[in-house]
Image (cartoon, grey):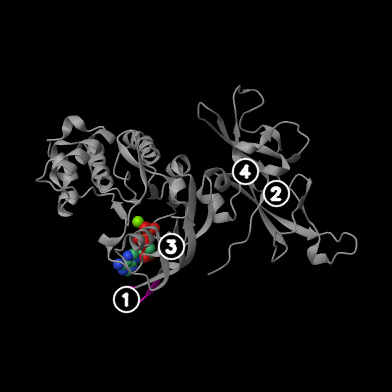
Amino acid sequence: MTIPVTTISGYDRIDPSSSPSREIVIEGARKTYITPEKVAINAIDDVSFSIKQGEFFVMLGPSGCGKTTLLRSIAGLETLDAGEIRLGSRRIDQLPPHERPVNTVFQSYALFPHLTVAQNIAFGLEMEGRPRPEVQARVTEMLELVQMQEMASRKPEQLSGGQQQRVALARALAKQPEVLLLDEPLAALDLKLRRGMQAELKRLQRTTGITFVFVTHDQEEALSMGDRIAVFDKGRPVQIGTPEEIYEKPVNRFVADFIGETNFINTDAVRAPDGAAAVADSPLIITLPGGQSVTLPKTVPTPDGTVTLAIRPERITVGDGAHHFATGTISGLVYMGTDLRCTVLLDDGTELGVRIPPPFDDKATKVGSVIKLYAEPANIRPLMPETAR
Ligand code: ADP
Ligand code: MG
């Protein structure tokens, strides 16, 4: 199989226009582990979605939600119990790992300690029996790509964690995979180094045009790096979207809670019959703690007559606004430099987080102050109830 390529900045960039449909399609994937205690764990629970060619795709979720299992299934290190994985029109889930045009970078860099940086990068190419001049040219390119030219003859133990990770990346990219799988590759690095490597990975992905499938449990990392993010809960993605969609329009409480900070307000919902429409099809009207009514789209299901609303702390404004929704008392204040983080206690006992941007009014904003809150209706988001599984 040949992949059409064009050369950009020393790397053979995959040209997306020449092969428009080489997306990864996962369909009906399942994987169940049986623990030594004979408990069945549905690590991947009927998962179907696709990853576009050339995108930086992030799989995000708490520990144990099945991210690694799915990534290993794409790599061929794990066998699915059901379902299939395709790359373009080709089914790959039954191919041995080395026949799949994918490569993996793990959290543990797994470099060969007795080989130099250059030898580590060359290793896979030599195993494939590529001609020596080609191997040398490619190693040079890869060293340049990860900016490690000066350290070509060092051994891994003479490198920092970040540098080792760069070598691991160079080694994985050297074989020109169509897809690079990355399982929490930055988790072992300290915060500052991690930020630097995040930018570096974005650059590498753009330069090479390779599809990156990046696993993390860190929501900030996911938001800052992903073209699209799949948020996983208990073995399946519950929402897939751009960082903005995931943040602004979380589909359920789990997503709203896992990504950023969110206030939840439970409130009664009544359906108001309009005209001849049946009650079940009519708009849903809810009343917020401050007495304001909000009409929800007809599509929001409310099984038990209540609905949960999500409002981000930074989307609540203090003062008199057209959409005043509650009055409350400031019960806590934390100064964060960029904003004041307030806890506001409403009359009905609900606690809300509110962020107040500068300039701060010290007189009006102190513990015990009674303040009015408002939010644009578009920023008050009804959540779908989570289906129990
Ligand atoms: P994540 O990468 O999101 O933390 P994993 O894919 O590693 O999640 O694991 C998903 C679930 O499967 C977890 O409950 C984990 O304990 C379980 N699991 C993973 N590998 C095995 C295994 N080899 N045997 C039994 N259970 C496993
Ligand atoms: Mg994992």
Does label 4 or label 3 sit earlier along the sequence? 3
Mark 1 lies within 8 Å of ligand 1 (Cβ measured): no
What stretch of residues is rendered in magenta?
34-41
Q: Depth-wise, is mark 2 or mark 4 nearer the camera? A: 4
State the mark number for residue 352. 4
Q: CA distance from mark 4 to mark 3?
A: 50 Å
Residue 44 versus residue 2: which sits nearer the camera? Answer: 2
Q: Is mark 2 within 8 Å of ligand 1?
A: no
Q: Position of residue 367 (x, y in %)?
A: 61, 32
The amino acid type found where label 1 is placed reads Glu
Q: Residue at x 44, y 48 (%)?
A: 18
Residues under labels 2 and 4: Cα distance?
11 Å
Q: Is residue 91 visible?
A: yes
Task: Judge the density around disc 2: few (<14), some (14-19), many (≥20) Cα neighbours within 10 Å.
Answer: few
Asked whether the residues under the numbered discs 4 and 1 touch, taking CB atoms below 8 Å apart as contact, a structural biologist would say no
* Callout 2 touching callout 3 (CB < 8 Å): no
Quickly name the residue at label 3.
89
Location of mark 1 (residue): 37
Camera-near label (2 vs 1) is 1
Q: Residue furthest right?
A: 275
Q: Main secondary structure of the magenta part?
A: loop
Instruction: Give the residue displayed 55% in from the left and 29% down from the top.
Output: 339
Give the number of the mark in front: 2 or 3: 3
**10 Å crowding of disc 4: few (<14), some (14-19), many (20+):** many
Mark 2 or 3 closer to N-term? 3
